[in-house]
Amino acid sequence: MANVAVIGAQWGDEGKGKVVDWLASRADVVVRFQGGHNAGHTLVVGDQTYKLSLLPSGLVRGKLGVIGNGVVIDPEALLAEIDRVTAQGLTVTPDTLRIADNATLILPLHSAIDRAREGARGDKKIGTTGRGIGPAYEDKVARRAIRVADLAEPDTLSDKLDELLRHHNTLLNGLGAPTFEKQGLLDHLLALAPRVLPYAEPVWERLDDLRRSGKRILFEGAQAVMLDIDHGTYPFVTSSNTVAGTAASGTGVGPSAVGFVLGIAKAYSTRVGSGPFPTELHDATGKLLGERGHEFGTVTGRPRRCGWFDAALVRQAVKVGGIQGLALTKLDVLDNLPELRIGIGYEIGGEIVRRLPASPRAQAAAVPVYETVEGWTGSCRGARSWADLPAQAIKYVKRIEELVEAPVTLLSTSPERDDTILVRDPFEG
């Protein structure tokens, strides 16, 4: 049996939470491998709705959850999330959750500088969540980050804070924002340490033991390929690599352990925040998609921009993200539309291409080239087999497969975990 890595194939918010939750019933452990609490997964289980940002989705299934070293962790946000889901009836203890001791921490100064810089950009905002994810990754790369293991060493923590404050207070001063005192930050971290450290361990060792014993590992990504720091619509991207290869480096397993790569894509397109979106709709259809799909960011609450399915963009995500099969979500949102459009490429400077270029100017100038297909009468909502789908909906799915050059291995037809059509079990490899 193969392990499985789940990544987004668009700009995030594709419904990864439900798919990971559904796949978790077949897994033994679920591992987050990048991002921070700017990610948001919504899981609907009966009359309970769980909104997760840092915690691996498998905890809802009672599976072991692991937060890998590729994740940046705000300890306050983590503990608040643990308290919230515990109040909803989940069991989150050091027996059910493990955290990489070499994971980087997000401190209050990171969110402060994130907000200050975004404010200074004026009308050229990137659209960050202001939660400090980018600045924390910057510190990690600059080798001045405070990591989970440092919470156990007050002297190390004190020395590292000196270096951090030299850097960040200088920037905050320049941006006209309040600066931070060392003692306040030190006291803050030492107060959190007794609650965080019981979860900490070298998770690479545990994952290696699990893999060798034949356990199934589900790697859970955040955001999506088009928000990847290298391969996305830069600079309107997140601050980590979101492609499947990061599942290895972000957890401490070898690349061969990642297994089958499942990409999640909506049957249409959405995006939160700023940045290019060639197939975006500003008309009544775009508004209808947003209303039917309840398109609001799980973390930010911001309304998502909506548009037609962009096959050229998803094809690009398939190639650079290592995607071997797609899970297509929210097919039911397209019910009873007389016709649908699929973006098959872009016209840029008089030339038609099937990829988004790296240049922000060229991305902004990309005009979508569409293929129009017939819509369907009837509903896909709640379908659990191909026989439950209108014939034209099946044709739509098949056309997407052709254009993105990847098979649809799973279909999600409502937020409910069991309203799913399994074409091929990803764990079968």
Image (tube, rainbow, N blue to C red):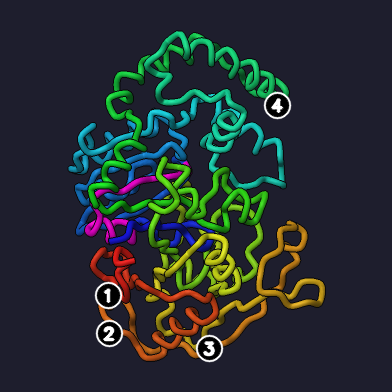
Q: Amino acid at mark 4?
A: Leu
Q: Secondary structure at mark 4?
A: loop
Q: Are marks 4 and 2 in contact (CB under 8 Å)?
A: no
Label 3, label 2: how far apart the Cα atoms are: 20 Å
Please determine whether, in this image, residue 172 is positioned above or below residue 330: above
The residue identified by callout 4 is 175
Chain-order first, disc 4 or disc 3? 4
**Which region of the structure is painted magenta?**
18-35
Q: Amino acid at mark 1?
A: Gly
Label 3, label 1: how far apart the Cα atoms are: 23 Å
Q: Amino acid at mark 2?
A: Asp
Label 4, label 2: how far apart the Cα atoms are: 57 Å
Q: Residue at x 32, y 85 (%)?
A: 389
Q: Residue at x 39, y 33 (%)?
A: 77
**The disc label shown at residue 388, or none:** 2
Please determine whether, in this image, residue 246 is positioned above or below residue 68: below
**The disc label shown at residue 373, or none:** 3
Chain-order first, disc 1 or disc 2? 1
Q: Are marks 4 and 3 in contact (CB under 8 Å)?
A: no
